[in-house]
Amino acid sequence: MAMKILIAEDELVSRRLLEAFLRKWGYAVVAVAKGDDAWALLEADSPPRLAILDWMMPGIEGVEICRRVRERTERPYTYMILLTARGHKQSLLAGLQAGADDYLSKPFDAEELRARLQVGERILKVQDELIAARDALHFQVTHDVLTGVASRGAAFDFLTRELARARRENKLVGIALADVDHFKAINDKFGHMAGDLVLQEIARRMTKCTRPYDCVGRYGGEEFLMIFPASTDEGLLRLAERMRKAIEATPVRTLEGEIAITASFGVLVAHSSGQGDVNELLRLADAALYRAKHAGRNRVERADLIGEQQVDTLSSSNAAPVI
Ligand SMILES: [Mg+2]
């Protein structure tokens, strides 16, 4: 796709000339005569990434457009060339200080303009590559490579953020720790490739049970941490039970054969009245998970909350034979 270039130039002859050259060189062109129109185009969706702006024109002047564009931080980079009849150094410096990337004196030399546009294109390309690399890196850091769910760090951040929000808005946050039952035995019997497949499948099944604003994260090894904003006790228990059943329902098919899988869950709902910090909550969820394991696995246990007299547990179906 041809790169789109904005020309903002009030002098008709100069504008037409620029337009003709740019089209000849294969660019897509949008040409306006007023600064206000140029600014509106740069503020719109999918704006031109490269702009040739006349310094002096009716409405917003080119140098002011440069300043405004640079004040925006959320938008993709716009490469701007200031067009000026002013030869003296002082105004050129002012233009560059305002945020222009380059300048061109009128009357312009076509080959010089072409070369400068190519520089601009090159810089935009490098910029795009850097952004893509940064985004890829961000994805890698925030996601678990094997299962594609949130990384441990990202899940932890999510929980910290949601707890703060819950306190602010007087809401509840559901937390679940899930652990694959007898995972070591699966690895020993079927190999690590099959073990990886089991983790991927379990992550997939649990994610399928969640809402878009929940977080499923790989907490470590065969353990998953899940966070459910605005969850109730009953809702959380129901959800965890649905996950448990989804995991138990069908064996995972691997090249080494079908593997029956189950998982145990420790869950708790953090109340806004202050249930302690993230570590304390995770410790409570972990204790509940431990009880689920101890009570025969393949079940959901609710955490023993501070100050609560009685611990409700949701007994699950009898633990299926696990390998
Ligand atoms: Mg002018």
Image: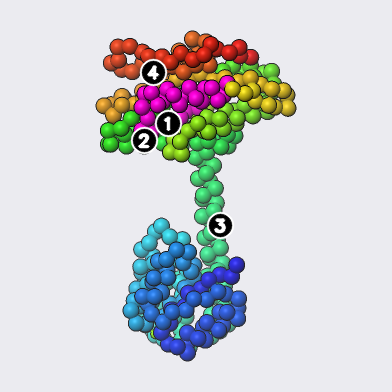
Q: The N terminus is located in which quarter? A: bottom right
Q: Within the magenta stretch, is there residue 242?
A: yes
Q: Within the magenta stretch, is there residue 310?
A: no
Sequence-first disc among 2 and 3: 3
Q: Secondary structure at mark 2?
A: helix
Q: Which residue is mark 2?
A: 162
**Which label was assigned to residue 16?**
none
Q: Which residue is mark 1?
A: 227
> Disc 2 versus disc 3: distance between alpha carbons?
33 Å
Sequence-first disc among 1 and 3: 3
Q: Residues within 10 Å of mark 1 (few under 14, many from 20)?
A: many
Query: Residue 208: x, y in percent?
Result: 53, 33
Sequence-first disc among 4 and 2: 2
> Disc 1 versus disc 3: distance between alpha carbons?
34 Å
**Which label was assigned to residue 129?**
3
**Which label was assigned to residue 303?**
4
Majority SS type along the magenta span:
helix
Q: Secondary structure at mark 1?
A: strand
Query: Residue 212: x, y in percent?
Result: 46, 39
Q: For the residues labelled 1 and 3, say whether their Cβ atoms are less than 8 Å apart.
A: no
Sequence-first disc among 1 and 2: 2
**How many numbered badges does the structure rendering display?**
4
Is residue 290 at least partly visible in the picture?
Answer: no
Q: The C terminus is located in which quarter? A: top right
**Disc 1 marks which amino acid?**
Ile
Q: From what the image shows, is residue 26 above or below residue 189?
A: below
Side of 277 where 100 appears, left or right: right
Query: Residue 195: x, y in percent?
Result: 64, 25
Q: Nearer the viewer, residue 130 or 167?
A: 167
